[in-house]
Amino acid sequence: MKKIFLLSTLIILSLTSEAQANDTEAALYNVGFGAVFGTVGAIINKSPDESLGKVIKKSLWQGALGGYITFESKRLLREARRQEQWEYFWAAKLVNAAGTSIKENAALNRDFYDKWHLNIGFSRIEFNTKNKFSVKYKLMPVAFAYNVDALFRYKFEFKNSLRVGEYIYSTRNELRNSGHVDFAANASAGYIVFNQSLNDFGLNVHEVIHLYQSNDFSIFNSYLNKPLTKWSAKNKTVKWLNEHLYTEYHYLILRPLYIFEANKAETHYDNIFEHEAQYYGRGF
């Protein structure tokens, strides 16, 4: 597992070495990300009696499909900014959920239509469409903890949350006037907080893209499916936790990579994550 983690990190660094300068490069990045990491996950999760070639072939195209759909969800957000229409945010969210679900299914070595999910704040709603249709709720503990903290520090914006499809907060007047806030807006695990106008389309798109980047990296949670399943079979507590929680292990990869990018970047937008968010949110 350690070797796979190191290999995945090297692949990510190679994929992010070139900034997304146009839609062709942006599409290739998203398609490549889904194809490569969907295939790695499928190899990890394949049964011993399955053909490696068939698993690779299946997961490669499924991951690529999920990556392309993810790319289109980001373009929908850009269209929201261009048209200044909030309705695009929910359309983009549903498309992004579909793309993320397909990539996850690829990494779990499933058919692309077996299971779908939608993330809202700290809630993950799963739709099982294999055999008998069912709906299941899971809590995402990292996002939940961050939102509890946000409730004490910021003001929850119900109207803005509804129109964007994400949990939205704003800084309180006393904090805003203190001069201790050095951001216009900031995306964190499961929410966005604004220190400036809540109605700035470009700023909203920029921060939602950061949440979509977290969705992109959630594919790595699938790599732990086998050990967690084995552990659940031996321990009732672990089994209950896995049935009711979706733990965001991918932040252990995403956060260090963001810091690495920030440290080596000459300017703020040389950071690949900030560059992508700005590419759709403001354009270059």
Image: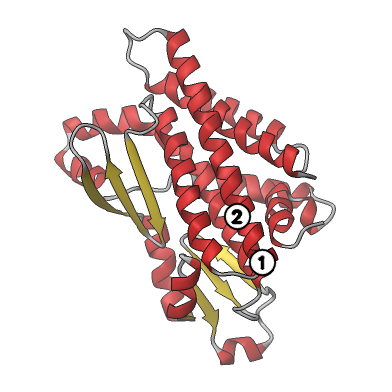
Amino acid tagged 1: Gln
Above or below, 201 relative to 51: below
Q: Amino acid at mark 2?
A: Leu
The crowding category of the residue bearing disc 2, from other C-alpha atoms within 10 Å (few below 14, some 14 to 19, many at least 20), is many
Query: Horizontal placement of 20 versus 230: left or right?
Result: right
Position of 9 with respect to 215 (left or right) is right
Residue at image x 73%, y 54%? Answer: 279
Q: Which quadrant of the structure image shows residue 184?
A: bottom right
Q: Is 199 rendered above or below residue 221?
A: below
Residue under the point 53% across and 32% down: 65
Residue labelled with disc 1: 83
Q: Is residue 2 visible?
A: no
SS of the residue at dot 1? helix
The mark lying in front, picked from 2 and 1, is: 1
Asked if residue 96 is positioned above or below residue 120 in the image, the reply reads above
Mark 2 sits on what residue?
A: 76
Q: Which residue ends up furthest to the left in the rendered image?
A: 236
Q: Does 229 appear above or below 145?
A: above
Disc 2/disc 1 C-alpha distance (Å) = 10 Å
Q: Position of residue 29 (x, y in %)?
A: 67, 36
Question: Which quadrant of the figure has residue 249?
Answer: top left
Query: What colour scheme has been applied to the protein in the rendered image?
Result: secondary structure
Left or right of 83 on screen, residue 90: left
Please state the horizontal and vertical placement of residue 19, each as a whole percent of the image: 77, 43
Task: Looking at this view, name the residue that lies furthest to the right.
Answer: 266
Residue 238 image point, x, y percent: 22, 41
First reached walking from the N terminus: tag 2 or tag 1 = 2
Identified at 47% across, 38% down, the residue is 219
The reply to whether residue 237 is in sight is yes
Quarter of the rendering occupied by the C terminus? bottom right
